[in-house]
Amino acid sequence: MTSNAGTGSDVQPRCPWSAASGEMLTYHDTEWGFPVDSDQRLFEKLCLESFQSGLSWRTILHKRQAFRRAFSDFDIPTVARFNDGDAARLVQDASIVRNRRKIAAVIGNARAAERLIESEGSLAAFTWSYEPTSEETEPPQTVSISPASVAMSKELKRRGWAFLGPTTVFAFMQSMGLLNDHTYDCVIRPSVQAARTGFVRPGR
């Protein structure tokens, strides 16, 4: 299933969800599915996906700049040093999702990320070690969970991370390029595939 989402004379097929707004279209065309190896960006996406649980990604995307301001651009060492006062301040910040448990989880996850980076070398190396093979990948946008997302979620939980279940981790994998989940006739799919082909996997 595809959508003719676009602007101006652009009527090429795209993933249906990209038609939700201009902001979603830009995200779809320039970010979603392109491989990422930045620890900061990977950490940010894990955090935002945890906030998205129970909400729409459109809501989170609209608030993304506010989240970045609130959490110091998701700089891992900085967020790991947040204290109870910072958490209390964030609960009062109407520009983000004011869920006390999720805010506490981001701070705790930053501390867990520091430990993970110390043991694995980088968050990117850890993340990409869970990249599924082509044989393990289902047709685009037909599943919301995978064996790889189950395994990664389980290991993150073992390492002290919170609010990152298998479905949340699968959405993270889709967006960060661990698989190309654009529909087969989506105009962006070939660009994502080319980016994945040329991408140097961290830690390899």
Image (cartoon, rainbow, N blue to C red):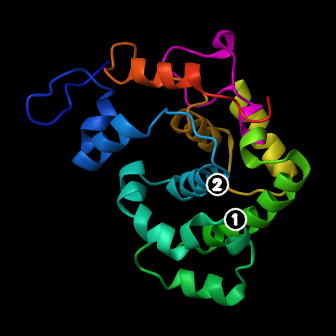
Q: Quadrant of the N terminus?
A: top left
Residue 6 seen: yes
Please determine whether, in this image, residue 2 is positioned above or below residue 56: above
Q: Nearer the viewer, residue 85 or 39?
A: 39
Q: Is residue 162 left or right of residue 23?
A: right
Instruction: Indicate the quadrant where residue 189 lies.
Output: top left
Magenta segment: 126-146
1 or 2: tag closer to the N-terminus:
2
**Residue placed under numbered mark 2 in the picture:** 43
Crowd rating for badge 2 (residues with CA inside 10 Å; few <14, some 14–19, many 20+): many
**Residue placed under numbered mark 1 in the picture:** 76
Residue 181 seen: no
| Type of amino acid at the residue the image marks with label 1 | Ile
Q: Nearer the viewer, residue 79 or 87?
A: 79
Query: Secondary structure under badge 1?
Result: helix
Residue 6 point in image, percent of width and height: 18, 33
Marks 1 and 2 sit apart, C-alpha to C-alpha, by: 7 Å
Residue 163 point in image, percent of width and height: 67, 55
Q: Are marks 1 and 2 in contact (CB under 8 Å)?
A: yes
